[in-house]
Image (cartoon, grey):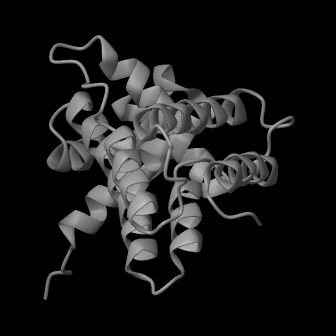
């Protein structure tokens, strides 16, 4: 009897191989040949799942986003105090561990690659800004924010901080490691919220 293949699982394995190649060699090294070798597949087998390199890269990028979104949904579903839920959710947006650092590195590479492609990338493709708007609404409804806060301005500031921390952790990991990223973000959030630590 022929072996059953989970095609979606195989596509995910190829995407994960793509991430590893990008982490080790950059986008220039993310050729179909190198990705196939990393995934342990022939070129023909890889093309069975992805007919073009751009299709493979777009799927790989989408999978990074889906996995981060799944982690955030899991936190949101937990029965946690609002303050803890707010902080934990925002911490998922910055590279505080190796898995998230690898995702961030790959995400930056994908973003630069697709930015000037026909159709490009919408600046909100990653969903971070709309997600932060929802989180700030949640914080306000939960009584975590001072009554006189300029929520729109604070959302922009938080968005800039999240992106800045991610970029600097990527560029200077020896200076800005995961624990320091977490401390900086928690410090900012504690100052933002109505209650003190």
Count of labels shown? 0
Judge by depth and name the residue closer to the eye, 170 or 142.
Answer: 142
Horizontal and vertical percent position of residue 96? 68, 54
- The structure residue drawn at horizontal position 31% and vertical position 21%, both measured from the top left corner, is 114
* Quarter placement of the N terminus: bottom left
Q: Is residue 6 above or below residue 90?
A: below
Left of 6 or right of it: where is 132?
right
Q: Is residue 37 visible?
A: no
- The structure residue drawn at horizontal position 51% and vertical position 74%, both measured from the top left corner, is 82
Left of 98 or right of it: where is 68?
left
Judge by depth and name the residue closer to the eye, 56 or 32.
Answer: 56
Horizontal and vertical percent position of residue 163? 55, 33
Q: Is residue 110 above or below residue 182?
A: above
- The structure residue drawn at horizontal position 58% and vertical position 37%, both measured from the top left corner, is 23
Q: Is residue 189 visible?
A: yes
Outermost residue toward the right in this view: 175
Judge by depth and name the residue closer to the eye, 149 or 50.
Answer: 149
* Quarter placement of the C terminus: bottom right
- The structure residue drawn at horizontal position 78% and vertical position 29%, both measured from the top left corner, is 172
Horizontal and vertical percent position of residue 74? 41, 75
Q: Quadrant of residue 30?
A: top left
Q: Is residue 32 above or below residue 82?
A: above
Q: Quadrant of residue 43?
A: top left
Judge by depth and name the residue closer to the eye, 112 or 142.
Answer: 142
Horizontal and vertical percent position of residue 21? 52, 38
């Amino acid at each position: 009897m022929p072996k059953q293949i989970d095609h979606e699982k195989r596509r995910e394995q190829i995407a994960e191989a793509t991430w590893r190649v990008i982490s080790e060699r950059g986008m220039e090294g993310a050729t179909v040949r190198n990705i196939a070798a990393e995934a342990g597949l022939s070129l023909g087998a890889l093309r069975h799942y992805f007919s073009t390199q751009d299709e493979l890269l777009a799927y790989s990028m989408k999978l990074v986003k889906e996995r981060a979104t799944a982690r955030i949904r899991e936190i949101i579903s937990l029965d946690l105090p609002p303050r803890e839920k707010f902080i934990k959710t925002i911490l998922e947006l910055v590279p505080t561990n190796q898995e998230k650092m690898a995702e961030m590195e790959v995400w930056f590479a994908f973003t630069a690659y697709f930015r000037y492609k026909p159709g490009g990338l919408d600046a909100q493709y990653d969903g971070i800004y709309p997600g932060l708007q929802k989180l700030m609404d949640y914080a306000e409804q939960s009584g975590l924010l001072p009554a006189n806060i300029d929520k729109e301005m604070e959302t922009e500031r938080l968005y800039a901080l999240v992106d800045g921390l991610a970029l600097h952790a990527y560029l200077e990991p020896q200076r800005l490691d995961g624990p320091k990223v977490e401390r900086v973000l928690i410090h900012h959030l504690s100052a933002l919220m109505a209650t003190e630590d």
